[in-house]
Image (cartoon, rainbow, N blue to C red):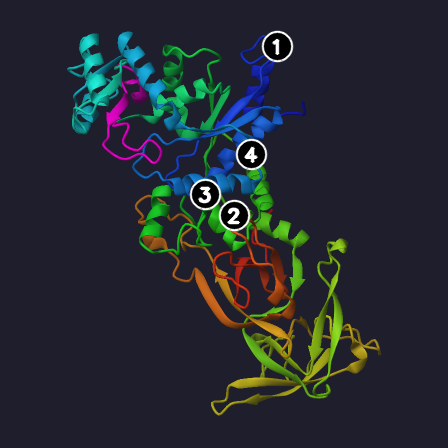
């Protein structure tokens, strides 16, 4: 195979070499999201590593929903997660599983541990449990640690039968109370919960803890490499203990940890993201300011840009925070190469070309994307009445102002040279119309006499042939780069200016026939000249009602 790219691939390559644990086997990984929320950009690193590692070695990657904690789990999230993974370009084939598929087998293996004297039913309350874990030098022993095996078996079976209230009993592993790793101090394996499960209904009232269920699920599926984030490093001894002490034929999975993805100006906790949704701080999980994949997709992010982002940040063992500007840079690079260039005026003011014949118009041929020759050209209409940006005119120009002001000549993008001759104001002194004259011999923007034009090139839209649009300008959801920092309430860090809505915008007529976006797919991206990259909103846009979201600005703030 090709040269390895990171330490995970080095471990896998070592395991596959002759004489080692996976020699002659197919690499098998899994992505195990909990269906209690929507996937966000932080999950992309994990799922990219899981699926890409399998692809790299010609192996397989399962999708398994970790639905062993039904409190916040829902089928809505199950469907959304599958949609997001497919959108990113990954596929699990026929290997879709649920942690709840293994409830019966997990229960049987818990009984096996009890029979081996490696688990017992405990009556400590959660508060007492913390107390009895002791400190680093003085562990405390549960009064029920030496409960007879037959008694624990009876109680555990009755726990399943629903004879006891929540919190009355737990099943605990009997490992090492003197361990310096608190995860090994007789951890809880099962607890009683009377709650409806999204797939199992009320069939079960005891649920396995993640640290017990997960290694069993990996082993049952034949997972060779269990790739997970760094916070599970301290849990690895327990993972290995479980797969070593239950009877499951086949290879024992190997857990390998990597650093989680942190990004500034956002939060990655699903609990906090849910709070933003439930308290109405955002317009839903797919709000374009959210770091969720559905929110990023609605904003105009492409799957290619997100995969490139994960590729650029790489894989490491050290936690770090990545600049959100790097993600924007990946999107900008992708859209710059492929997006169609169009003209849109967001804050319009009239421009009248006084020496252009009234009622006349012409079609100008313009490139769709100068970086992509196969993108072709389109025709844009030009007439006496145009729209330009309000800040492209100043009656009294500021120093070094290179746009329209009386007596100054500029280029109209792809059209003609025009010279400003004045303006019209309303009774309050506000400019309502800019007046100019064009040079008929400068079609395309180049003067016939070869004179140098000092003015800027400004964009425009034909007022007699254009479409109306609403445009939404998005900024960071949080004004603080570390809203999740210590001693901070992340809600206090919300950016009050994270969304600006502009109505009455004017866009090229061709956008009136733009294809409407489809849920679960990327909307077509456009570069609004001099403005940024935009896409139609996949929820609110409709034929005759154009709503554009700014995906990213033109200027790249990331220091490469």
Q: Residue at label 4?
A: 91
Q: Which mark is residue 5?
A: none
Magenta region: 178-205
- CA gap, disc 1 and disc 2: 44 Å
Q: Which element is circle 3 on?
A: helix
- CA gap, disc 4 and disc 2: 15 Å
Q: Give the percent coordinates (x, y) of residue 164.
A: 16, 25
Residue 469 location, quadrant? bottom right
The residue located at (49%, 71%) in the rendering is 503
Q: Give the percent coordinates (x, y) of residue 14.
A: 58, 16
Left or right of residue 443, residue 213 in this image = left
Mark with earlier residue (4, 1): 1
- CA gap, disc 4 and disc 3: 14 Å
Left or right of residue 94, residue 240 in this image = left
Q: Residue at label 3?
A: 80
Q: Which element is circle 1 on?
A: loop
- CA gap, disc 4 and disc 1: 30 Å
CB under 8 Å between callouts 1 and 2? no
- CA gap, disc 3 and disc 2: 9 Å
Q: Residue at label 2?
A: 520
Nearest the camera: 455 or 198? 198
Left or right of residue 445, residue 129 in this image = left
Q: Residue at label 1?
A: 18
Nearest the camera: 437 or 280? 280
């Amino acid at each position: 195979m090709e040269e390895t790219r990171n330490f995970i691939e080095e471990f896998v390559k070592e395991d596959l070499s002759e004489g080692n644990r996976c020699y002659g086997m197919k690499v098998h990984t899994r992505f195990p999201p909990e269906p209690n929320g929507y996937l966000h950009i932080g999950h992309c690193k994990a799922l990219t590593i899981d699926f890409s590692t399998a692809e790299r070695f010609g192996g397989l990657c399962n999708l398994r929903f970790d639905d062993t904690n039904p409190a916040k789990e829902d089928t809505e999230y199950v469907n959304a997660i599958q949609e997001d993974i497919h959108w990113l370009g990954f596929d699990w084939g026929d290997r879709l599983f649920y942690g709840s598929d293994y409830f019966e087998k997990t229960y049987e293996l818990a009984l096996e541990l009890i029979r081996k004297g490696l688990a017992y039913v405990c009556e400590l309350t959660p508060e007492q449990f913390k107390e009895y874990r002791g400190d680093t030098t003085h562990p405390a022993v549960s009064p029920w640690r030496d409960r007879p095996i037959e008694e624990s078996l009876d109680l555990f079976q009755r726990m399943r039968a629903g004879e006891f209230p929540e919190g009355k009993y737990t099943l605990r592993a009997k490992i090492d109370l003197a361990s310096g790793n608190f995860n090994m101090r007789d951890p809880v394996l099962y607890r009683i919960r009377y709650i409806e499960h999204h797939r199992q209904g009320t069939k079960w009232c005891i649920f396995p803890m993640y640290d017990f269920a997960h290694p069993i699920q990996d082993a049952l599926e034949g997972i060779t490499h269990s790739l997970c984030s760094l916070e599970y490093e301290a849990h690895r001894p327990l993972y290995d203990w479980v797969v070593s002490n239950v009877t499951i034929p086949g290879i024992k999975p190997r857990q390998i940890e990597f650093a989680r993805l942190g990004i500034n100006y956002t939060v990655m906790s699903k609990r906090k993201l849910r709070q933003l949704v439930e308290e109405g701080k955002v317009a839903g999980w797919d709000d374009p300011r959210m770091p969720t994949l559905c929110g990023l997709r609605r904003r105009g992010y492409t799957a290619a840009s997100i995969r490139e982002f994960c590729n650029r940040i790489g894989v490491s063992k050290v936690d770090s925070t990545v600049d959100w500007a790097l993600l924007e840079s990946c999107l900008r690079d992708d859209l710059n190469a492929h997006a169609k260039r169009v003209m849109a005026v967001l804050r319009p003011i009239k421009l009248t070309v006084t020496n252009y014949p009234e009622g006349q118009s012409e079609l100008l041929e313009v490139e769709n994307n100068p970086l992509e020759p196969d993108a072709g050209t389109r025709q844009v209409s030009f007439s006496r009445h145009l729209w330009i940006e309000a800040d492209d005119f100043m009656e009294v120009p500021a120093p070094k102002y290179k746009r329209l002001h009386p007596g100054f000549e500029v280029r109209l993008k792809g059209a003609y040279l025009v010279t400003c001759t004045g303006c019209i104001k309303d009774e309050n002194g506000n400019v309502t119309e800019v007046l100019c004259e064009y040079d008929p011999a400068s079609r395309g923007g180049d003067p016939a006499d070869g004179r140098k034009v000092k003015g800027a090139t400004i964009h425009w839209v034909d007022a007699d042939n254009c479409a109306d649009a609403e445009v939404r300008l998005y900024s960071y959801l949080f004004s603080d780069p570390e809203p999740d920092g210590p001693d901070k309430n992340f809600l206090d860090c919300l950016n009050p200016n994270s969304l600006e809505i502009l109505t009455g915008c004017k866009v090229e007529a061709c956008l009136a026939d733009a294809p409407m976006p489809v849920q679960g797919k990327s909307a077509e991206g456009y570069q609004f000249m001099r403005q940024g990259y935009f896409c139609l909103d996949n929820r609110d846009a409709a034929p005759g009602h154009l709503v554009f979201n700014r995906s990213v600005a033109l200027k790249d703030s990331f220091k490469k």
